[in-house]
Image (cartoon, rainbow, N blue to C red):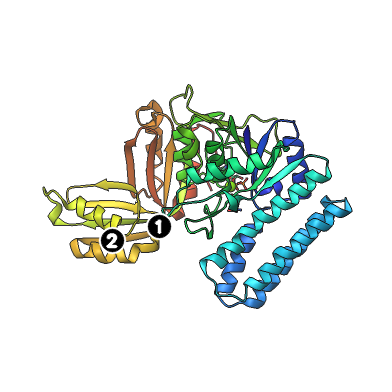
Amino acid sequence: MQVLKFGGTSVGSVESIKNVKSIIDDDQPKIIVLSAMSGTTNALVDIVKRIEDNDFVIANTLIQNLKSSYILVINDLLTANKIKAQALQFVDEVFGLLSKLIHQDLTAIVSNTILAQGELLSTFIFNCFLNQEGIVSSLLPALDFMRIDKDGEPDFFYIKKNIDFLLQANPNSKIYITQGFICVDEYGDISNLKRGGSDYTATIIGSVIEASEVQIWTDIDGMHNSDPRYVDNTSPISHISYDEAAELAYFGAKILHPQTVTPVRHKNIPVQLKNTMQPQAFGTLIDSNNISRGIKAIAAKDGITAIKIKSAKMLQAYGFLKKVFEIFEMFETSIDMITTSEIAVSLTVDNPKNLERILVELNKIAHIEVDSHQSIICMVGHSVVSDADTYKLFQILKDVDIRMISYGGSNNNISLLVPSTDKIKALKQLQNYVFSKPVLIT
Ligand code: ADP
Ligand code: ASP
Ligand code: MG
């Protein structure tokens, strides 16, 4: 069995939905994971924010606008009267619920319920469409099997047991449709796998059902060698390893949720990235076979805070770093980059949630300097550290204000910390030097 995940733009219009149908309609058994239609989760996040700010009138306008956009899609996509009526009724229920929820206390359950509606809508409508087209399909409610534990990790045992049960309960289908992104937590309360989480849903399912392959269908022809949102002349990479994909996803390649490859790498289940708009393009294959050496791609991650911890006590002392790390552990904050000198250690974090409290503790043992609005630029490739072309990286040093360099922590990754204002310049220059394609630096 294959697992195919279609992202927001892949189901973002009537035309794209029809396109998805033609991609999946090949008589092979499969589980289809859908994201919300593009723009919907952002709109739902906005609605939650308006409720938080007591902006109920605007929240209600956003709800009504979103509802109108779904009615337009249904009127265009669904022509069979009975099926269309079912879909319109579902839309009424969803938006009726949203209108009620804006008047309740904004608990985590209420806000997660609001955020979940996009995937519930897209899967219901897509299932209606397949039924209209005479394709037998079943909806598998993700909230009945996708569960995370107290650490936010997938509860694989529970997921397997429940998805197997649901698959057996619907033996006549070859096509199963389920929601990406949404799940329940250890208490059974509605939750989600964080933004972009439908990719993760697909590989979690792929892992528990021992899929032959997981395909991630999106709006670009695979993993590119740099971020196409900031750099021109990027090109797709046909083959990367799980390790390389994990580094790129973690360090900002938006095409993949940071955790995507984790559930499948130890089972060697291949992940294929494909372009819904151009299905014939090869895309990117992620597995662990015959991986070539050298620099494959560059990614960037924003929202980084750098902390410099200076203390004369570090001089020829032991145990100082232990104290520093204990503080980060106490506040459950992970460290991304780290460099040390004789009397100082610089490190970065991407989660500022507990930063204030961390700084209070660090101030007790050292002098602290904090720089926010930083970005990590990460060069990824198998054995990149020993690659002959690595020197090219340092050609950008003269133009970009590099604050930290991490070299050799992993063989697959060299990271630089730069102020976010220099990120695009650094990405463009690296593209120019590393992949030897001239680009205009603006
Ligand atoms: P989906 O809605 O299908 O999940 P996403 O928007 O999450 O799609 O991911 C696809 C987008 O990721 C692309 O349109 C592209 O702008 C962005 N992206 C960032 N870095 C990369 C990269 N290295 N390769 C390909 N796409 C990238
Ligand atoms: N709809 C969710 C989001 O926009 C999940 C996803 O698209 O993967 O973040
Ligand atoms: Mg995505």
390 sits left or right of 136 in the view: left
Q: How many marks?
A: 2
Asked whether residue 434 is in view, the answer is no
**Residue 17: percent from the left, percent from the top?**
75, 45
Decide: is 365 above or below 140.
below
97 sits left or right of 323 in the view: right
The residue pinned by badge 2 equals: 369
Provide the secondary structure element on which disc 1 rests: loop
Residue kind at label 2, given as amino acid type: Glu
**Residue 304: percent from the left, percent from the top?**
40, 55
Per the rendering, the mark at residue 102 is none
Decide: is 364 above or below 78.
below
Front-lying residue, 401 or 60: 60
Provide the secondary structure element on which disc 2 rests: strand
**Residue 352: percent from the left, percent from the top?**
39, 61
Residue kind at label 1, given as amino acid type: Asn
Asked whether residue 93 is in view, the answer is yes
Mark 2 or mark 1, whichever is nearer to me: 1
Please report the residue visible at 79 percent of the width from the left and 39 percent of the height from the top.
Answer: 135
**Residue 287: percent from the left, percent from the top?**
51, 29
Q: Quadrant of residue 372?
A: bottom left
